[in-house]
Amino acid sequence: MEDYIKETKILEKSDKEKEVELMISIMKAKKELDEACKNFEYAEEDLIDYYTYQIKACRAKFDYLVKQAKSQGLALDMIEQIQIKFDKAI
């Protein structure tokens, strides 16, 4: 049996990093939900069920993430949202 040695130390994220990551996840989930809704509008008969389930899954994910943010007392205003997008682009 081989022993594996950890070469690098795994650093835990700070609270601020976790908050930013949660907000980014919320924005991504919202975008996925919006895309699923748009796709549903143009779906043909065979894809209607698929997009219905996709919308339901995306909505559940979005609701869960928003609930997590609310339980932590986090709020995202438009300025923070724009700043986060700008920081990710750089």
Image (tube, rainbow, N blue to C red):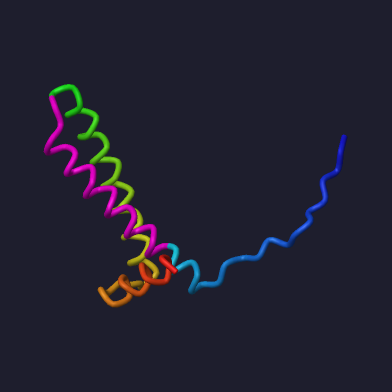
Taking depth in this image into account, of 38 and 9 the one nearest to the observer is: 38
Q: Is residue 25 left or right of residue 15?
A: left
The residue shown at (31%, 72%) is 82
The residue shown at (13%, 35%) is 42
The N terminus appears in which quarter of the rendering?
A: top right
Taking depth in this image into account, of 88 and 25 the one nearest to the observer is: 88
Instruction: Please state the horizontal and vertical placement of residue 11, each as a whole percent of the image.
Output: 65, 65
Q: How many numbered marks does the figure carry? A: 0
Q: Residue furthest front?
A: 90
The residue shown at (32%, 52%) is 29
Instruction: Please state the horizontal and vertical placement of residue 90, each as a whole percent of the image.
Output: 44, 69
Q: Is residue 80 above or below residue 42?
A: below
Q: Is residue 12 above or below residue 33?
A: below
Taking depth in this image into account, of 24 and 82 the one nearest to the observer is: 82
Instruction: Please state the horizontal and vertical placement of residue 52, each as a whole percent of the image.
Output: 20, 34
Q: Quadrant of residue 67?
A: bottom left
The residue shown at (24%, 29%) is 50
Secondary structure mostly taken by the magenta-highlighted segment of the chain: helix
Instruction: Please state the horizontal and vertical placement of residue 86, each as a whole percent of the image.
Output: 37, 71
- Numbered range of the magenta stretch: 22-44
